[in-house]
């Protein structure tokens, strides 16, 4: 995995309509084109309320909307549980089985859930170059939530002559 560097970009900071996920069984999210990236880290941030049931669903897709979706093999989801006292939380793996496409927090105090998907996990030869991420809530209590997408390893180059015109 690449560390954060000049090839890292945070895109699409909030999932469409993710602030105030209200109503029964709401799902919010979007798809990201992985054609020019090595990996994506998908971070779900949500209000930790006792009794809430959240999942972060991550699949590969063959179109930006509609089309087909299928499981991304080998996903491992992580959560961060709110620390108590002066101790820091250590990320726990919440899904380790191959073939699962969703992760759910194991503690009511968990406020972050994240997963990394690399381009080589996608069926690009079959046309699946998009990653679909959806934050789902299964009960009717309104709450706040968002998905942050962090792209790494850009597979394109900037034309060095472009910079010269900006500096004039």
Image (cartoon, helix red, strand yellow):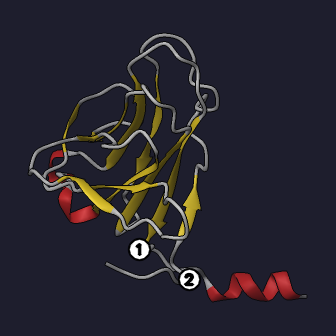
Residue plotted at (49% across, 12% down): 140
Q: Residues within 10 Å of mark 2 (few under 14, many from 20)?
A: few
Please name whichever residue, 71 or 24, is drawn nearer the observer in this view of the structure.
24
Residue 94 percent location from the top left of the image:
24, 51
Number of other residues with Cα within 10 Å of mark 1, as a class: few under 14, some 14 to 19, many 20 or more: few
Q: Residue furthest left?
A: 98
Q: CA distance from mark 2 to mark 1?
A: 12 Å
Residues marked 2 and 1 touching at CB (< 8 Å): no
Q: Quadrant of residue 138?
A: top left
Q: Label 1: which residue?
A: 155
> Percent from the top left, x then y, of residue 97?
10, 50
Q: Residue furthest right?
A: 168
Helix, strand or loop status at disc 2: loop
Residue at label 2?
Answer: 6
State the quadrant of the N terminus. Answer: bottom left
Quadrant showing the C terminus: bottom right
In percent of width and height, residue 158 lies at 58, 80
Identify the residue shown where x is 52% and y is 73%: 8
Q: Nearer the viewer, residue 165 or 82?
A: 82
**Front-most of 164 and 80?**
80
């Amino acid at each position: 995995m690449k560390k954060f560097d000049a090839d890292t970009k945070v895109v699409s900071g909030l999932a469409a309509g993710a602030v105030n996920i209200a109503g029964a069984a709401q799902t919010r999210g979007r798809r990201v084109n992985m054609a020019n990236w090595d990996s994506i880290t998908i971070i779900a941030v949500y209000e930790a309320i006792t009794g809430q049931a959240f999942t972060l669903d991550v699949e590969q897709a063959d179109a930006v909307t509609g089309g087909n979706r299928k499981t991304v093999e080998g996903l491992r989801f992580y959560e961060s549980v709110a620390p108590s006292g002066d101790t820091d939380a250590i990320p726990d793996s919440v899904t380790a089985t191959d073939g699962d496409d969703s992760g759910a927090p194991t503690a009511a105090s968990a406020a972050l859930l994240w997963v990394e998907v690399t381009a080589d996990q996608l069926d690009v030869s079959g046309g699946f170059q998009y990653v679909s991420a959806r934050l789902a809530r299964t009960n009717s209590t309104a709450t706040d939530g968002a998905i942050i997408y962090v792209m790494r390893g850009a597979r394109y180059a900037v034309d060095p002559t472009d910079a010269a015109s900006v500096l004039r």
